[in-house]
Image (tube, coloured by chain):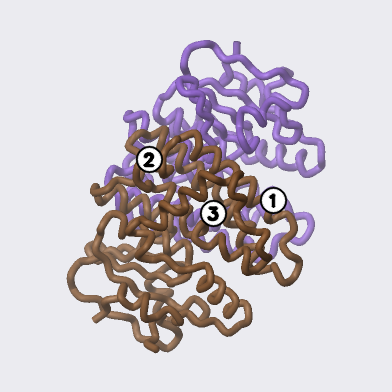
Chain colours: A purple, B brown
Amino acid sequence: MSKLHLSKGSTQPTFPDDQKLRLYSMRFCPFAQRAHLVLDAKNIPYHTAFINLTEKPEWFTKVSALSKVPALEIPESGDVLIESLIIADYLDEKYPQNPLHSKNPLEKARDRILIERFNGFTAPFARIIYNHKKDGAPGAIHEIVTILDLFEEELKKRGAKFFGGSKPGMLDYMIWPWCERTDMLKYMLGDKYELDKVRFSELIKWKEEMKKDKAVKEHYISAEDHYKFISLRLANTPDYDFLAPTAAKKIRLS
Amino acid sequence: MSKLHLSKGSTQPTFPDDQKLRLYSMRFCPFAQRAHLVLDAKNIPYHTAFINLTEKPEWFTKVSALSKVPALEIPESGDVLIESLIIADYLDEKYPQNPLHSKNPLEKARDRILIERFNGFTAPFARIIYNHKKDGAPGAIHEIVTILDLFEEELKKRGAKFFGGSKPGMLDYMIWPWCERTDMLKYMLGDKYELDKVRFSELIKWKEEMKKDKAVKEHYISAEDHYKFISLRLANTPDYDFLAPTAAKKIRLS
């Protein structure tokens, strides 16, 4: 199996001299997935280099100031942008096609606040993933459900297929990576941790619609595979490359 | 002395029916200060209600979903925006006068990344303030200085009076509240914690220029008073109102 994620001892990749954007990513990172989703939803051509985050390449600190993914390199200026939300907003402002944020400042602010509040999901979700064999992360499920109630209510209020209306917008894409991973909970905690079909009926419909979206499909990983990655990582035997053949189609390094 | 900050048992303020924005704030909160700075830098008229964060009014949870300040109420739509950076960006997008963010998406992204990286200052700074009598917050000064080096370097590179150029921009205003408070360190830790005059020469010049800015002056609190507020709070005898006469000029409640 080919080695997809670059790690310690690797040489820095050279990209074709074509002025395309360069995304430093990790195949299972939800934050990096945000950048992929925006790039693909807007049909912006780019190169990807995948980074092994357990054994980071020595050269990577020189590329990304804080050695973080996602990092977006702009060949034109030499800038390397970090922070998934800043990268997403930059792309939406710079490339006018398929605008993801509303042009109405108030609607945009509302969505940005919801993206921020979604941290009330991602934080306890991470606690469950990393602690479920220790203490079960008490209270975490309650925190998650509180946020899901908020989003279910919001989707009802908007009365549309997506938070963005008739197509996914920035809010849809920014929360998607964690929604893709929610089914991991049943592998970790048991079947009763499936979304309640009545309480979250709108979100469940939304999730099915999202799965049909071209950009979402491009990066989709099944809950089984997400769980496999996490399990191997928790066992201190991480394997970044077990999806390599699928992921490799995204990489076009010289 | 008049009671400025509304607390438990207070009645919800009624604002004049004039469609002006309404800011829920706390006089010593650096995040709320960000919202004041943007409103005043752009000359946007607004009302202020100050909230006692130790004894929050019962009605405040209904106003601000997470009971946080700053919260910006928009009478026109009934929205209440939270998160200082989202409020700041909303105001800059909605009100075209004196634009604070660059219209160039890349320049804007660079500044937003620096605002994000400045969290590397605010977090250890808070640790020092709240722990200096316990363990002195080991490592915190080193973290702070690393960030100050980054900003000193950036200001040199830009070769301008402010990060925003010839006038303060969004980056200047977003980091200012903590820069105003840096002199507290010498009250807490002793004289050697003044900024090194050679190493941080650009930042020291910048700070003096910022102090002359109209919006900065409007909310300026001396390091002595910041320290007094923190000391009383740490002693469990908080006094939100000791600057009330100065602060009261900002409040025009009916």
Q: Position of residue A61 (x, y in %)?
A: 67, 31
Per the image, the residue denoted by label 2 is B165
For the residues beneath circles 3 and 2, the answer to whether they share a chain is no
Rendered-image quadrant of the N terminus of chain A: top right
Residue at screen point 33% across, 48% down: A160
Q: Nearer the viewer, mark 3 or mark 2?
A: 2
Residue B70 position (above or below residue B242)? above
Task: Write down the quadrant of residue A59 in the picture.
Answer: top right
Viewed as shown, does residue A219 lie left or right of A43?
Answer: right
Residue at screen point 34% across, 59% down: B215
Per the image, the residue denoted by label 3 is A119
Q: Nearer the viewer, mark 3 or mark 1?
A: 1
What kind of element bears circle 3? helix
Q: Amino acid at mark 2?
A: Gly
Contact, CB < 8 Å: mark 3 with mark 1? no
Residue at screen point 42% across, 31% down: A41
Q: Amino acid at mark 1?
A: His
State the residue in front, A200 or B113.
Answer: B113
What is the C-alpha distance between the residues marked 2 and 1?
29 Å
Viewed as shown, does residue A120 lie left or right of B127?
Answer: left
Residue at screen point 67% across, 36% down: A225
Viewed as shown, does residue A124 lie left or right of B221?
Answer: right
Q: Is residue A208 visible?
A: no
| Chain identity of mark 3 | A
| Chain identity of mark 1 | B
Task: Write down the quadrant of residue A191 in the picture.
Answer: bottom right
Per the image, the residue denoted by label 1 is B142
Q: Amino acid at mark 3?
A: Asn
State the residue in front, B168 or B71.
Answer: B168
Q: Residue furthest right?
A: A236
